[in-house]
């Protein structure tokens, strides 16, 4: 198998998967404005893919889960993030993603959402390491059915569930020799209520070196820009980082431009482009989902709050177009 992870230049700067944020519309904009080294899709339910395609008989064109797996060539290498606690479902979805042309499969073992945990997925996997290992193996097997040689399989997880348990948890994952491991430096219990524990990353590096030295190790949590990313990589010894919340309102994140260098006109134009791409997604997403981007893009200059207020009461692309077309900075 040809793994793109082996050819990436280090340090690696990756785009985090965030539900209803890094959708195909915003990812295509990010790829155009400042491409990351690796891009993840939003996380997608492997069980949901099987149920909607094989049981309900939804066509791919009308299936929201298949929409979430859309990508552009500009985003490569592009990784499909999946979640499941059922090896058969994971194998099915991994085979599908291999046939769709993805460059890799990532398994979410860190999401703290209770509805995901009830399925035994996300951060709940930290409590069931044997299931977690079976899921990694199933992802590999499925990808090999979908593409000769298979695809690289990676994992995104946390440092523990109720408390930090890296010494117990990480060797379990690393025993399966994942191609990459992204470590969010908080426990599931901590959510985002405390600063990320970057002081623990050197120990994670040592565990990786001991149990699976070929695994690429990325850190995640509280990274504000590329300068901060470089500093954290240098201090911890990891191979790269995954940036998430910093991408809000900043498709230029993966360049060395600071937001102070981005004019209000550029921000407005970027939001307008995002709105057009968002509205072109099929099946359509509800317009209100786009509104979480308004505050992020429209801030930092006199009059921004007034414009933002007008945008927040819009209910369609046409209304947004009308407001932005008549606005003058």
Image: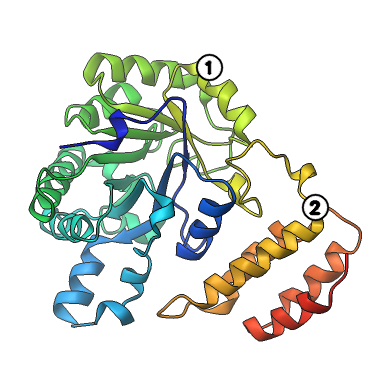
Name the residue rendered at 23%, 68% in the picture: 49
Near-viewer residue (259 or 209): 259
Q: Which residue is mark 2?
A: 263
On the image, the x and y values in percent for residue 15 come to 48, 45
Q: Name the mark on residue 194.
A: none
Place of residue 4 in the rendered image (x, y in percent of width and height, measured from the top left): 29, 37
- In the rendered view, does 15 fall on the left or right side of 222? left
Residue 62 seen anywhere in this rendered image of the structure:
yes
Return the x and y of residue 127 as percentages of the image width and height. 26, 40
Residue 234, labelled with which disc?
1
Are the two marked residues, 2 and 1, in contact with CB atoms closer than 8 angstroms? no
Mark 2, Cα crowd under 10 Å, few <14 / some 14-19 / many 20+, is few
Q: Nearer the viewer, mark 2 or mark 1?
A: 2
Mark 1, residues whose alpha carbon is within 10 Å: few (<14), some, or many (≥20)?
Answer: few
On the image, the x and y values in percent for residue 79 come to: 33, 49
Name the residue nearer the viewer: 224 or 104. 104
Seen at 91% across and 59% down, the residue is: 302
Q: Spatial distance from mark 2 to mark 1, Cα to Cα?
A: 31 Å
Which residue is depicted at the point 25% across and 22% down? Answer: 214
What's the coloring here? rainbow
Secondary-structure class at tag 2: loop
Q: Is residue 89 above or below residue 284?
A: above
Residue at the (74%, 64%) spot, across then down = 268
């Amino acid at each position: 198998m040809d793994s793109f992870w082996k050819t990436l230049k280090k340090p690696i700067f990756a785009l985090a998967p965030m539900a209803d944020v890094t959708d195909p519309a915003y990812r295509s904009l990010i790829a155009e404005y400042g491409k990351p080294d690796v891009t993840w899709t939003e996380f997608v339910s492997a069980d949901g893919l099987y149920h909607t395609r094989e049981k309900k008989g939804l066509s791919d064109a009308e299936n929201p889960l298949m929409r979430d797996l859309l990508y552009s060539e500009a985003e490569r290498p592009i990784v499909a993030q999946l979640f499941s606690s059922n090896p058969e479902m994971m194998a099915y979805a991994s085979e599908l993603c291999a046939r769709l042309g993805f460059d890799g499969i990532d398994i979410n073992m860190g999401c703290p959402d209770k509805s995901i945990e009830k399925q035994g997925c996300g951060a709940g996997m930290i409590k069931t390491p044997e299931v977690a290992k079976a899921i990694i193996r199933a992802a590999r097997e499925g990808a090999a059915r979908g593409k000769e040689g298979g695809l690289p399989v990676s994992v995104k997880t946390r440092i523990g569930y109720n408390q930090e348990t890296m010494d117990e948890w990480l060797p379990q994952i690393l025993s399966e020799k994942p191609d990459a491991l992204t470590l969010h430096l908080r426990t599931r219990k901590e959510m985002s209520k405390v600063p990320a524990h970057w002081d623990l990353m050197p120990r994670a590096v040592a565990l990786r070196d001991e149990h699976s030295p070929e695994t690429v190790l990325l850190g995640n949590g509280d990274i504000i820009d590329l300068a901060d990313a470089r500093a954290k990589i240098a201090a911890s010894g990891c191979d790269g980082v995954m940036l998430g919340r910093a991408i809000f309102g900043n498709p230029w994140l993966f360049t060395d431009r600071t937001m102070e260098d981005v004019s209000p006109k550029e921000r407005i134009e970027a939001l307008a482009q995002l709105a057009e791409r968002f509205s072109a997604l099929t099946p359509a997403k509800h317009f209100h989902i786009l509104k979480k981007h308004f505050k992020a893009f429209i801030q930092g200059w006199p009059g921004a709050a007034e414009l933002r207020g007008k945008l927040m009461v819009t209910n369609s692309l046409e209304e947004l177009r009308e407001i932005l077309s008549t606005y003058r900075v």
